[in-house]
């Protein structure tokens, strides 16, 4: 009787990431062990009631109250901290979950970890921890619950939590230190991809993960499908293509080059850095980027040290007061006058919300490389930002270039992975189109959010 029961003991429950891109909260249960993989923020659920761009956001001072009140977070006992539950109708309970494994440091994978009970151990790669600690030091964000124990894991090294054995394997994605997981409960085997791609700077990492996943003969594959769509509407550029095209822009420019990229996309930084160096230009970065690069100096991914590298300068905007962490970088900083005087020999990294600095920098002419996603037609805010950025470019006689490679595998690459891993069942997450996975020809389980699925 017991043995028969055991066979059905292992389960998957997807609390976030079902029919939405991001918000991954994936629970693996086996016997007496319960482990979460990722605990991210769901943007599409949040967007039903909140518009952060219009300052309509949940009342963070009340912890999980608004999230529970609007069913934006799973009501699970023994998971959240006392502080997060203080204003809710849920009583605090000692942890009933054994660990959280974080795949990579993107908001939609980590950002709800801040509500977790700090008694629950968190496992993440060393690079991820360095990136999150830098974010905490330079913003008001809490990424890792205060007092929580962080256990750094390494690619290929098994970690045992209760009856669940986890092998993290490095994959390539648009942030360094991203991992997928091979999970073995002794009874069943699972694969969770996290976010991954094959067209970045390290396709061999993703390949390594796929080989491991193939060999597992998995019972269930939990796979991302960000770009799975009925028709591929976006260009499928590779990182080497972005590098080559950006190099042409920099070679042919007649003025200043301004670059925009996602703050944690350090592959893209490396692309711009090496192009600048080749062209004999200085790359000028924000204090936040400098802090992040310093946090990662000594890390295995080998980023340049902005305080020691002659090709890098830090742009400190003029403002009334500076944070302590900014003051520590002051020595190596330049201001708007320096950039104005040297505009032909610099590549300036500038976030869109600092565009007004151009009023002081006064570029005579040049080029803007927008190295982020194209505007989404469905999202009026991103379309508006796009229009405004074009206006800035025109105002300062700058050519506008859209050059970006996605952090996610394309539709056909995802289907190829499903085929190679050849799991008994495939569970699509981090996608708006889970039903399309049926076209892969493999058995697909369309799970409902928060509904336990016995494997
Ligand atoms: Zn990601």
Image (spheres, grey):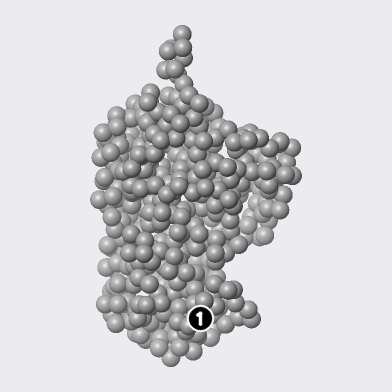
| Depth order, front residue of 28/427 | 28
The quadrant holding residue 244 is: bottom left
Q: Residue at x 40, y 64 (%)?
A: 296
Name the quadrant of the C terminus.
top left
Q: Residues within 10 Å of mark 1 (few under 14, many from 20)?
A: some
Disc 1 target residue = 330
| Depth order, front residue of 28/436 | 28
Residue 158 is situated, as x and y percent measured from the top left of the image, at 35, 39
| Depth order, front residue of 355/10 | 10
Whether label 1 lies within 8 Å of ligand 1 gets the answer: no
Residue 217 is situated, as x and y percent measured from the top left of the image, at 29, 29
Q: Residue at x 28, y 50 (%)?
A: 205
Q: Residue at x 72, y 44 (%)?
A: 86
Q: How many marks?
A: 1
Let me know if residue 57 appears in the view.
yes
Relative to 429, is 283 above or below?
A: below
Residue 87 is situated, as x and y percent measured from the top left of the image, at 74, 44
| Depth order, front residue of 316/295 | 295
Furthest residue in direction top, as rendered: 1
Relative to 151, is 200 above or below?
A: below
Residue 365 is situated, as x and y percent measured from the top left of the image, at 41, 84
Let me know if residue 387 appears in the view.
no
SS category of the residue bearing label 1: helix
Relative to 287, is 227 above or below?
A: above
The quadrant holding residue 297 is: bottom left
């Amino acid at each position: 009787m017991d043995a028969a029961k055991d066979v059905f003991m292992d389960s998957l429950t997807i609390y976030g990431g079902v029919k939405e891109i991001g918000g991954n909260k994936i629970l693996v249960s086996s016997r007496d062990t319960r482990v979460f993989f990722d605990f991210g923020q769901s943007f599409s659920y949040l967007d039903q009631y909140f518009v952060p761009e219009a300052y309509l956001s949940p009342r963070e001072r009340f912890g999980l109250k608004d999230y529970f009140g609007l069913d934006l977070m799973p009501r699970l006992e023994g998971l959240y901290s006392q502080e997060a539950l203080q204003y809710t109708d849920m009583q605090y309970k000692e942890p009933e979950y054994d660990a959280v494994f974080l795949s990579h440091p993107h908001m939609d994978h980590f950002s709800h970890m801040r509500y977790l009970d700090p008694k629950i151990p968190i496992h993440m790669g060393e690079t991820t921890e360095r990136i999150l600690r830098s974010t905490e030091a330079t913003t008001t964000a809490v990424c890792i619950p205060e007092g929580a124990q962080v256990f750094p894991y390494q690619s290929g090294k098994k970690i045992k939590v209760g009856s669940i054995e986890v092998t993290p394997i490095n994959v390539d994605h648009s942030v360094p230190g991203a991992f997928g997981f091979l999970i073995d409960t002794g009874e069943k085997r699972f694969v969770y991809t996290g976010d991954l791609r094959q067209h970045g700077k390290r396709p061999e990492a993703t390949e390594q993960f796929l080989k491991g996943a193939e060999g597992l003969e998995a019972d269930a594959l939990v796979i991302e499908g960000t770009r799975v769509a009925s028709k591929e509407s976006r260009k499928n550029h590779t990182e080497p293509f972005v590098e080559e095209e950006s190099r042409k822009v920099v070679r042919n420019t007649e003025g200043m080059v301004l670059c925009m990229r996602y703050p944690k996309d350090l592959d893209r930084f490396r692309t711009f850095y090496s192009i600048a160096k080749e062209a004999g230009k200085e790359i000028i970065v924000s204090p936040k980027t400098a802090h992040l690069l310093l946090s990662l100096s000594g890390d295995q991914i080998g980023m340049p040290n902005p305080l020691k590298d002659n090709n890098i300068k830090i742009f400190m905007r003029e403002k009334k007061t500076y944070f302590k962490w900014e003051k520590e970088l002051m020595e190596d900083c330049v201001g708007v006058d320096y950039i104005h005087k040297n505009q032909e020999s610099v590549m300036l990294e500038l976030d869109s919300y600092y565009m007004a600095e151009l009023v002081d920098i006064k570029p005579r002419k040049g080029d803007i490389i927008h190295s982020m996603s194209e505007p989404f037609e469905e999202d009026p805010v991103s379309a508006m930002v796009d229009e405004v950025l074009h206006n800035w470019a025109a105002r300062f006689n700058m050519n506008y270039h859209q050059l970006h490679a996605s952090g996610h595998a394309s539709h056909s690459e995802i289907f190829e992975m499903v085929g190679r891993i050849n799991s008994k069942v495939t569970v699509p997450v981090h996608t708006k189109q889970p039903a399309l996975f049926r076209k892969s020809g493999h058995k697909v389980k369309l799970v409902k959010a928060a509904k336990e699925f016995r494997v």
